[in-house]
Amino acid sequence: MRTISITTLLIFSFFYALAQSGDPRQNSKDLNEQLKKFNQFYHFLNYSYVDTINNSKLIEDAIKKVLSELDPHSSYVNAEDMKGVEESFGGSFSGIGVEFDVLSDTLIVVNALSGGPAESVGVMPNDRIVVIDGVDVVGIKRNDVSKYLRGVKGTTVDIEVLRRGEDQRLLFSIVRDDIPLNTVDGAYKISSKIGYVKINRFAATTNDELLAALESFGEFESLILDLRGNGGGFLEQAVLVSENFLEENLKIVSIEGREPLSKNIKSKKDGKYLTQNIIVLIDESSASASEIVAGTIQDWDRGVIVGRRSFGKGLVQRQFKLVDGSAVRVTIAKYHTPTGRVIQRPFTKGDSKAYYDALNKRFKKGYVDSVSNIDSLRYKTLRAKRDVYAGGGIFPDVYIDFDTTGHTIYWANLVRKGVINEFVISYMDSHRKELKNEYRSFKSYSRKFEVSDEMLEELMTLGETRGVKRDEKQMEISSSDIKSQLKAMLAFRLWSLNEYYKLRSLDDSVMIKALDILENWDDEDITKSISGF
């Protein structure tokens, strides 16, 4: 079956013209004429062309091409992948736990689901997967991805990844597991006055999960809402989450699109948590619904945003089902924060590579993601009249740079090859009873348990057997951080993710800064709460 490049280009051109034709209600006559023209052309093509034509492929390629010329977030999802999308928001399956997209023939990790197998070995958003179990997957079709990545629980899949800033491919060994579908990963009280909730994405149950967590806290004065790594999700859930902290009739988000789509979405009632001090944690992977929540809290001076600038995805997609069960996600509007700031990062139509490369620039050594690094517009918050900024994403009130003090290539390789995860599993197999007997409570474990040098030696030996060359010097640099990571991972397997986050927060510079801010909180003037940071 031969590729017909001229025909494909004609189809591309036709669909592109439709996409650029403006409001179909104003151009219905022209649109109908163009459709007649295209149908006539396609009829002649099918009945006259010398070779057999793969109509399904031509149409799919045409749709993908048109969407790629519009913006970085409009996309096509085939029928098989749609089943997986629906599962990820309401069912369960075994796999490696990544949300993905295929752009320019490259399989890109959109999000590594928190608590999932891929996330546990260090797979990150924007990683490019180029090899799966020895098979080159450059050029892979979306409907083939699940065949490679999903499988029986307990089986292993090896992937090779390209990551910006890394000279060589990164190798990961991932053990498939049931994919966690909860959206609240951690919820606990840091102290009698401070609660902590981590939300990994916004799905149908997010607000219910959040309310259940907050209810379980009883009385509390302050909340740290952790949206780091949260790639977004359902708009209505972002609205409901924001509404918990706002008075009635306050704008949460405005949507700018074709009439009658354009509208302001406001809180429908007084939230239950109007008096608590709020800190929202964000980073470069916080996107879409996460940015709506962060922008709302910031614009209404309801809290302080801490961390690094968010992703900058402020385009609204609507999903349209097609006749074969596939779907297109078409950008229909733009999000604005309550002050009118545009969340979406600038982009050039048809150049998704440059769009994602601009994000990866933030990871380069020595790069500080401050307001001065991009062209930004200054806005004033709605109550305290503080300066906030537009230009793509939500700028934190308090910026915390990457903490790379103990990071080494050796540590990264132990994570990527699955050695640390394998070590923890093996250690639990051998010492679970011993740990359970000695540490009857997390409090006791947190206070007394220490990862020994002997354990690190066992880890290095296991690494050698998995192809990670021993590096004593780099281990010395990373040993403190690795011990902290191992202690938290063991706690997770002994108790829950809550205990994991409790321990990791002890070395988390963003969390430490958030707690410092709460100690200096001024109920009368939020600007004073963040002065000096």
Image (cartoon, helix red, strand yellow):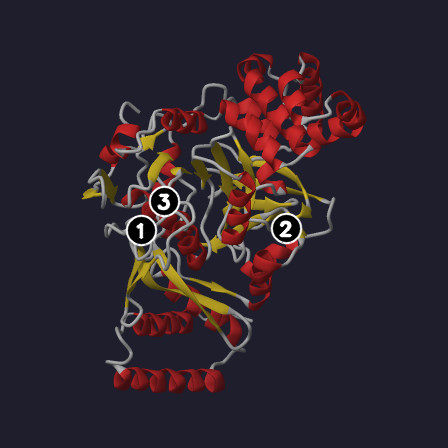
Q: Which residue is mark 1?
A: 344
Q: CA distance from mark 3 to mark 1?
A: 14 Å
- Looking at the rendered structure, the kind of residue marked 3 is Ala
Left of 80 or right of it: where is 128?
left
Residue 14 visible here: yes
Q: Which residue is mark 2?
A: 149
Which label number is shown at residue 463? Answer: none
Q: CA distance from mark 1 to mark 2?
A: 31 Å
Q: Which residue is mark 3?
A: 294
Nearest the viewer among 221 and 49 is 221
Question: Taking 241 as reference, is 225 above or below it?
Answer: above
Residue 11, image x and y in percent? 39, 73
- Looking at the rendered structure, the kind of residue marked 1 is Gln
Question: Taking 478 as reference, is 259 above or below it?
Answer: below
Decide which of tag 3 and tag 1 comes sooner along the chain.
3
Toward which corner of the image does residue 461 lie, by quadrant? top right
Q: Quadrant of the N terminus?
A: bottom right
Q: CA distance from mark 2 to mark 3?
A: 33 Å
Q: Quadrant of the C terminus?
A: top left
Left of 273 or right of it: where is 113?
right
Residue drawn 65% across and 36% down? 496
Decide which of tag 2 and tag 3 comes sooner along the chain.
2
Residue 420, image x and y in percent? 65, 28
Mark 3 neighbour class, 10 Å CA radius: few under 14, some 14 to 19, many 20 or more: many
Element type at mark 3: helix
Residue drawn 70% across and 31% down? 494
Nearest the viewer among 59 and 410 is 410
Q: Nearer the viewer, mark 3 or mark 1?
A: 3
- Looking at the rendered structure, the kind of residue marked 2 is Leu
Residue 406, image x and y in percent? 50, 19
Element type at mark 1: loop
